[in-house]
Image (cartoon, rainbow, N blue to C red):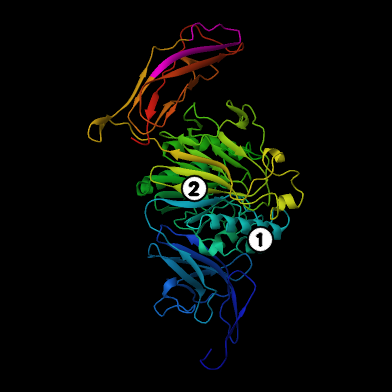
Amino acid sequence: MAAGLAAITATAALGIGSITMAGAQAPATTSSIVLGVGAQANQRVVSWYTSANTAQSVQVAPTSTLSGGEFPAGATTFTATITANTVNGGFNGHAVLSGLQENTAYSYRVGSEGAWSATYTFKTQTFGGGFDFLFYGDPQIGSSGNVGKDGAGWEDTLKVSTAANPDAELLVSGGDQVETANTESQWDAFLKSDVLRQYPWAATIGNHDVGGKAYDQHFWTPNTDRSAAFYNGDANTRSGGDYWYVYKDVLFIHLNSNAYANGSDPAHVKYVTDTVNAHGGEARYTVLVFHHAIYSPASHANDGDNKQRRLDFPTAFSNLGVDLVLAGHDHSYSRSYALKNGQKANAAEQPGAASVVTGPGGVIYVTGNSASGSKYYDLTKPVAGEFGPDPLNPKSHYANSVENQEHVRTYVKVQVRNDKLVVENVRSGTCAAPNAAVELGQESWCGPDSGATPAQPVGSIVDKVTIHAAEANTDGQVGGSVPATLSLTLGAAPSFGAFTPGVDGEYTAKTEATVISTAGDAALTVSDPGHLTNGAFSLPEPLQVTFSKSAWTAPVANDKVDVNFKQVIKASDALRTGAYTRSLTFTLSTTNP
């Protein structure tokens, strides 16, 4: 359009952060703007939908430099990449914002001169050390059958969670943003809240996000590998891939767990291995995120694909030093024990423990409940021989320290600190609206204890745990005169005596451990007890080991601990003549030497 030949007027339009231009050869309109995570803490990504394949960009400036809402002449411009939108026509764009400064509030807008979107803001904090992030399970907008109610619940959770945690630095997805991959009305409801333009969304693909291109077109993710093993389905319609980024003290790795068959799980393990080997040294913690929770507590607990993942993933994750795994899919909350190679790392860890020392190879797995209230799954009864009961709490599955379903919306807050991770499951709603599944009568009860207890207030804590990683035990001087000491002495080797074949029996034995510690805290753990063996033969039932005491919060001297052993023999157990034995490793460790 030649200058001076036509007038251009900006008017409001439907859509998320959108504008419409009227006049000859009207510039492109923009919608569905979302702020995403970058490859590192000084980057952000902005993605959006646009009506035309024209030159577009993201304009960014420190908020303090805007005058009357106008960007300064020196505002930085990041050129966008525009590609065809195969879902509903039009195009989608993204731009990587790099070189951001820490502790700065920024304003940004999307589009081109004369056709800018509304202005949005975000803030950076320090680029090193501790931080908080929020994790959300399955919004799945549309799954209740009422997009408006689902969207209202999701919008309220975003509002409540960020109001309570204004300095949270990332919003991490558990997958299933929407019910139907290419239904843009569901995406519009998912993206309605401006919170998703103020805090970076770290997207994860769920099973309801596949089968279409909308997920990829709405979210550009850094360092993404879309090799066939990570990117299942027809190449013309599939979305997803595996990707990673380092944010301050955490290496985050997101996996497309929809791809699991035909060699995909080993490929995921290799991806995690290669990424940890290449970038694990850049961060203190490793956090994995994928949709299909392998220790889920509800209706998906014994799905065939989850059974397979429980074989494929746990040992690799323990060997790689993974600290925390976040997942969704089961629309209920669970927090695992510290698991090493898929089994409890510390046999003495109690259900619901508020503090856990993971030890080398210990991993905590968290399943996120519904963040929108669009759909809940009730907890299921453990199935013996599959995902069986916890001996300490038979109502729960053996891997899980906590399982919870109240039919209220929740989110997970994670505090990353130099010496610990703190994980909290927080209520973001009550039984009252917005809570679509309850409002629509799809749930017959609501509240704790299957509805027997009144719903707790917004912001109340369902579960909280402090996770300490074990540190190596070294001798040396602490202060000027006291040497750092962790001493563990075991008494005489215990014996069960003679086992009687063909008779049900429960055999017990005991020894004593003596603990000396000059540390601020200490924890006593034992290696996987496994099974007693006699040459090539093993007892069918596992050895059980418990302690009369396993944790100290202050220095101790010659503290006596009963170490109890139990071996169950069933009448049907075949026994081989000779001695059955097992070597165990007992470890005294500290996080505060």
Q: Quadrant of residue 511?
A: top left
Task: Answer above or below: position of 177 versus 304.
Answer: below
Q: Quadrant of residue 5?
A: bottom right
Disc 2 to disc 1, how far (Cα)? 28 Å
User: Is residue 509 on the magenta stretch?
Assistant: yes
Q: Quadrant of residue 234?
A: bottom right
SS of the residue under disc 1? helix
Residues shaded magenta: 496-513
Number of the label disc, if any, that sits on residue 186: 1
What amino acid is labelled 2 in the image?
A: Val
Instruction: Give residue 211's position: percent from left, percent from top.
Output: 62, 55
Q: Earlier in the sequence, mark 2 or mark 1?
A: 1
Instruction: Give residue 362's position: percent from left, percent from top.
Output: 45, 35
> How packed is label 2: few (under 14 Cα within 10 Å), some, or many (20 or more)?
some
SS of the residue under disc 2? strand
For the C terminus, give its image quadrant: top left
Q: Residue 62: in sight, yes or no?
A: no
Mark toward the viewer: 2 or 1: 2
